[in-house]
Amino acid sequence: TTAQLLLGKKVLVTAGPTREQVDPVRFFTNHSTGKMGYAVAKQAAKLGAEVTLISGPTNLSTPKGVHRINVQSAQEMYEQVMRHFEQQDIIIKSAAVADYRPKQTYDNKMKKTGGPLVMEMERTPDILKTIGEQKTSQYVVGFAAESTDVLHYGEQKLKKKNLDAIVINNIQEQGAGFGGETNKVIYLTAVGERIDFPLQSKEDVALHILQRIALQLKDDRR
Ligand code: PMT
């Protein structure tokens, strides 16, 4: 059935990688394609939510009924998320945001020299942590892409960033993480739930996570 579980809810989703510019020709990025986040946006819209998708650069088309805002850098994503977050009921952060960016960016193409290049990097703003600190009634869900001690690091992020839930994927596992049409995740909540979902399509992962969130909101009478 297509029960409108999220009818009347405002959902903000972030998706894709960020690009951290070095000069007009070069940037730092990661392997995120946006598929996981776009699946969340698509399913949330199908469940009746009013969906805003803040997306890094991807090749994907905007899911039906979703309001999409394009960004490039972690800083731009931060600004757009902060602009929209207050009026949301649910925030789901599936984007793979760069943790570091070049401390200096150049207006002109950098010239090579004979020797090696040393580039200083600085931290980007932690969007999720900021939301965790500022949230009032919003239900905030993070993702964690881990390759070792996945449960341990996932739990740590859930607590440290003051999230309501976290979706942990082990990027070393077959069929999970970046790219591809499938994912295999563990869902942890601040109230101590743990669900180990089987390997399934990103669309099904998205649907099952959204169903859990809808149930929790109903329990909380939010
Ligand atoms: O896009 P796909 O190819 O489909 O791949 C999906 C995915 C692997 C990118 C996705 O499932 C996923 O795991 N996304 C989160 C990736 C990530 O950056 O994880 P992290 O453990 O580094 O960050 C933890 C959380 O903090 C994430 O919700 C991230 O959005 C957020 N974060 C991180 C850094 C930062 N500066 N600001 C943030 O908000």
Image: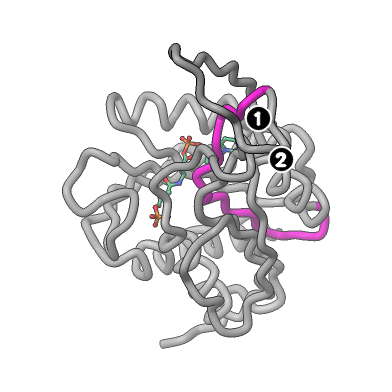
Residue 146 or residue 212, whichever sits in front: 146
Q: Is the N terminus in the top left, top right, bottom left or bottom right quadrant?
A: bottom left
Which residues lie in the magenta part? Answer: 86-103
- Above or below 71: residue 96: above
- Above or below 57: residue 148: above
Q: Quadrant of residue 33?
A: bottom left
Q: Quadrant of residue 99?
A: top right
Q: Which badge, 1 or 2, comes first in the chain's sequence? A: 2
Q: Which mark is residue 124?
A: 1
Residue at 71% across, 76% down:
8
Amino acid at the residue labelled 1: Thr
Where residue 172 sits: x, y (%)? 22, 38
Where residue 114 sits: x, y (%)? 45, 15
Mark 1 touches mark 2? (CB < 8 Å): yes
Residue on which the image places disc 2: 75
Q: Is residue 59 magenta?
A: no
